[in-house]
Amino acid sequence: MPDRLTRLPRPGRGRILHAVIEAALMLSSLLLAALLTGDARALAAWGLWALPLMLIAAGLGNAFDLHRATPIRHLTSDMGRIALISGIASLTGILLSAVVAAGLSARLFITAGLVYLLVSGARHLWRRHDGGTRPTGRAVDPAALLGRDALENELPDVNDVYSGRRILVTGAGGSIGSELCRQLVQCRPTTLILMDHGEHFLFQIDRELRDLAPDLEIIPILGSVCDAALVNVLMRAKKIDVVLHAAAYKHVPLVESNAIEGMRNNVIGTRTVANAAREAGVERFILVSTDKAVRPTSVMGASKRFAEMIVQDLATRSDKTRFSMVRFGNVLGSSGSVIPVFADQIARGGPVTLTHPEVTRYFMTIPEAVRLVLLAGSFARDGDVFVLDMGEPVAIQDIARRMIEASGYSVRDAANPRGDIEIEITGLRPGEKLHEELLIGSDMLTTPHPRILRAQEGHLSEIELAKALKSLSEAIETRDVALLRSILAQWIEQVEADEAVND
């Protein structure tokens, strides 16, 4: 694709108008330069060089796409291109004068170039800041991009379930984990334990929560969910009542290229925490899952489906701990979601990158996702999979367009070639689907809330799961990616081959 600053001009009224304006600016600059230099011969002979220099200014201006007020980040480069046009026009005037023996001085054309630089540059800068092209700078409300009404106000309170409890949140520094902690503070637990392997994010949420609830006992634990010794000691020493397991590697392309560590953290980590909860007699264990676990095409999705099956299996063998899981789609505003990615691309002037023009996703806000997780803890029996009625899936291209327009720009496409920011199609990434699903089967049961459903889904038997986990552990310890992928293909129900995108 040609560089957006140097591609060939497109025909249109905007370019014609720009050519006329730039030609008039050059003509005015030349006449003013003649007056400033006091060269009477220049005033008499201006017709010799006015027309060619006008054409040069207009043509180069169009070639460099100066008819369009591009985002402000291009100001420096645009002024440089205006200076280049000015220099070329001045040099051409000097050469033209020599060829036709008009006797006009180089000072005249240098002065004319400087005048043109100042006038055209000022005009270009003004166009960036007039009412029609200035970015609004206002933040985009994620809830406005859902395509449905937000549900957090419809979901009931869960204070009674978590009040007075000792609660462990894994992945407490992440987007979902940190919001879980914020909402749990309002439930007045006895103790809130924050576990995360990221020092910076753990420090941030710990400090924030201490400001929100100075009287609450908050215990930050820096460590990995794969550390069995740490997790077991923590469960027993702190007498945990409720575990909310949100720790996971979730970025599909990153986990796809780091399959071993993705499976270690998401599968082995879940098994470690879930087993420790069961052995310690924890009252409730809630797994935060994803729609990418449904017939996955990615390593990340497969790892989360394995984690679900571990929880489902333990639910059949636990006398005291109630195991459940919550499955939902993409969370607007979370780290790595389209909202911050698109916002950053728009702030840099584009293009906004989209993997496929038809890609769709289910979306929910962070408060919705967290309230659903907390509700699952109150509804849970044994091995339940809860999903939210999320309405219709949303086209990612629609979100990109809305965000561009909400930021004060227009979309540049075939219908609007003079637009500000282009949406660039990059192609589906390895492991990525066009459309996500929320359910493996079709059987759905109701819950006490009409917008929350309970799925009835099968899973591996205890013997099958033990065999699969043994093979998976071997692949992880030997770092055998080929073996790992063959295990996933053997034990995880996946989509048809033509729907998947693989390396």
Image (cartoon, rainbow, N blue to C red):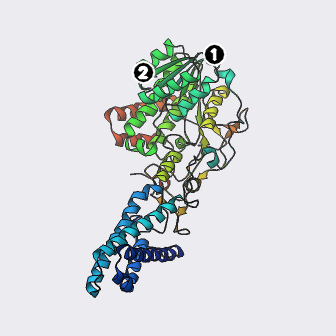
Mark 2 → mark 1, Cα distance in angstroms: 27 Å
| Residue 398, quarter of picture | bottom right
Q: Which mark is residue 164?
A: 1
Amino acid type for the residue under numbered disc 1: Gly
Q: Secondary structure at mark 2?
A: helix
The residue at the point 44 percent across, 42 percent down is 299
Give whichever of 38, 279 is nearer the camera.
38
Q: Secondary structure at mark 1?
A: loop
Left or right: 167 as drawn, with respect to 86:
right
Mark 2 vs mark 1: give the one in front: 1
Using the rendered image of the protein, determine whether residue 501 is visible from the camera's viewpoint.
yes
- Residue 374: horizontal and vertical position, in percent? 63, 29
- Residue 237: horizontal and vertical position, in percent? 49, 12
- The N terminus lies in quadrant: bottom left
Give the labeled residue for mark 2.
Answer: 228
Please identify the residue farthest to the bottom as the structure is shown. 100
Give the answer, above or below, for where 225 lies relative to 406: above
- Residue 262: horizontal and vertical position, in percent? 41, 37
Give whichever of 306, 461 is nearer the camera.
306
The residue at the point 46 percent across, 33 percent down is 266
